[in-house]
C-alpha cells in the first residue's frame, strides 16, 4: 500500500528572485574587490571568468541552502 505525502509548498518566483539578489550582490561585490586586490593587472573578462563560476558555486552549494532554510517561513507564506 502506497503512502501519499502532502505536496510541499513551493515559493513564488518573485520571492526566490529577491532572495537570490540579496545573496548574489555581496558575493559578487566581495569577489570583485578580492580579485582586483589580488590580480590588479588582470583584464576585466578574466576577472569574470574567475568570479562567475566561483560565485555561482558558492551561491548554489552554500548560500542559497542556508538562506532558504532561514527564510523558509516567508518563502512558503
Image: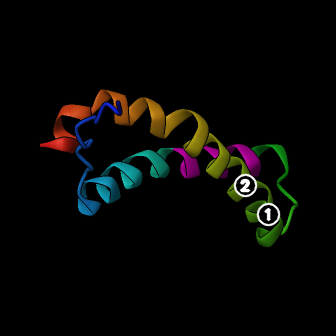
In this view, the residue in front, 74 or 32, is 74
| Residue 42 location (% of width, % of height) | 87, 62
Work out how far the residue at label 1 is from the one at label 2, CA to CA, in angstroms.
Answer: 7 Å
Image: 56 above or below 44: above
| Residue 52 location (% of width, % of height) | 69, 58
In the image, taking residue 19 as reference, residue 64 lies left or right, namely right
Q: How is the image coloured?
A: rainbow
Q: Residue furthest front?
A: 1
In the image, taking residue 69 as reference, residue 6 lies left or right, namely left
Q: Looking at the magenta stretch, what is its main secondary structure?
A: helix
Quarter of the figure with residue 12 = bottom left
Where are the magenta residues, as a range? Answer: 27-36
Quadrant for the N terminus, please.
top left
Q: Do the residues under discs 1 and 2 have CB atoms within 8 angstroms?
A: yes
Quarter of the figure with residue 4 = top left
- The residue pinned by badge 2 equals 53
Circle nearer the viewer, 1 or 2 = 2
| Residue 53 location (% of width, % of height) | 72, 55
Mark 1 closeness class: few <14, some 14–19, many ≥20 residues within 10 Å: few
Secondary structure of the residue carrying tag 1 is helix
User: At 79% across and 56% down in the image, what residue appears?
Assistant: 50
| Residue 43 location (% of width, % of height) | 84, 69
User: At 60% across and 37% down in the image, what residue appears?
Assistant: 61
Secondary structure of the residue carrying tag 2 is helix
Mark carried by residue 49: 1
Quadrant for the C terminus, please.
top left
**Residue 59 sits inside the magenta stretch:** no
Amino acid at each position: 500500500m502506497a503512502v501519499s505525502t502532502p505536496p510541499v509548498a513551493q515559493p513564488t518566483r518573485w520571492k526566490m528572485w529577491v532572495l537570490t539578489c540579496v545573496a548574489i550582490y555581496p558575493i559578487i561585490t566581495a569577489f570583485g574587490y578580492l580579485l582586483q586586490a589580488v590580480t590588479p593587472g588582470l583584464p576585466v573578462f578574466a576577472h569574470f571568468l574567475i568570479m562567475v563560476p566561483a560565485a555561482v558555486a558558492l551561491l548554489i552549494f552554500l548560500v542559497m541552502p542556508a538562506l532558504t532554510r532561514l527564510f523558509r517561513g516567508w518563502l512558503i507564506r
